[in-house]
Image (spheres, rainbow, N blue to C red):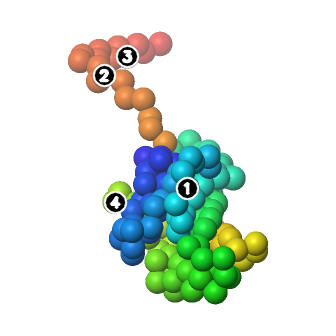
Amino acid sequence: MIKIKDIKTAVCKKIKEYDNTIKVHTEEKVQGLKRPCFFVKLIPFFERKGTYASYKKVLIKLTYLPRSDENDECYEMADILNNEIFEFRFDVLDRVFYIENKRININDNKLIFSFDIEFFDSVMIEEYPNMEELELVKTIE
């Protein structure tokens, strides 16, 4: 079963694999902020549970604060995120997630890159111990 924390860890790792000098934050409030940096936020926005599996959708929102005060660095990072780091898919533990509905917004010297993932996840079923001995009695009327 995949947890939101597993997805967040995989997203952060993917960014760090591209450039390990860029700080990646998972909390919104950070003291002593050093640029460039990313903020990663995951928002589960849909879940439908069935008997044996659940269907989930998660919004992944990356906020990039560039080193300079010019939007050019945001446009460059948008291309890198869109075409290199999160082009089609990414791995989480032993699963592969395909990226859907990518969105790019650059405003006030800040890049917001977001996308959705959707997946099925198995529901843990409580197991009971096997019966040791079963006796069947058949009566005829």
User: The disc labelled 2 sits on which kind of residue?
Assistant: Pro
Check whether the beta carbons of the residues at disc 2 and disc 1 lie within 8 A of each other: no
Numbered tag placed on residue 94 in the rendering: 4
Identify which residue, 123 or 1, lies in the foreground: 1
Query: CA gap, disc 2 to disc 4?
Result: 29 Å
Secondary element at tag 2: loop
User: The disc labelled 4 sits on which kind of residue?
Assistant: Asp
Closer to the eye: label 1 or 3: 1
Q: N-terminal of the two: label 2 or label 3? A: 2
Q: Which residue is mark 2?
A: 129
Location of residue 77 in the rendering, given as x and y in whole percent from the top left corner: 55, 80
Q: N-terminal of the two: label 2 or label 4? A: 4
Secondary element at tag 4: loop
Check whether the beta carbons of the residues at disc 1 and disc 4 lie within 8 A of each other: no
Residue at 51% across / 83% down in the picture? 80
Q: How many numbered discs, if any? A: 4
Q: Which residue is mark 1?
A: 33
Numbered tag placed on residue 105 in the rendering: none
Query: CA gap, disc 3 to disc 4?
Result: 49 Å
Q: Is residue 138 visible?
A: yes
Q: N-terminal of the two: label 1 or label 4? A: 1
Q: N-terminal of the two: label 3 or label 4? A: 4
Q: Which residue is mark 3?
A: 138
User: The disc labelled 3 sits on which kind of residue?
Assistant: Lys
Quarter occupied by residue 91: bottom left
Residue at 56% across / 73% down in the picture? 67
Secondary element at tag 1: loop
Location of residue 108 in the rendering, given as x and y in whole percent from the top left corner: 76, 72
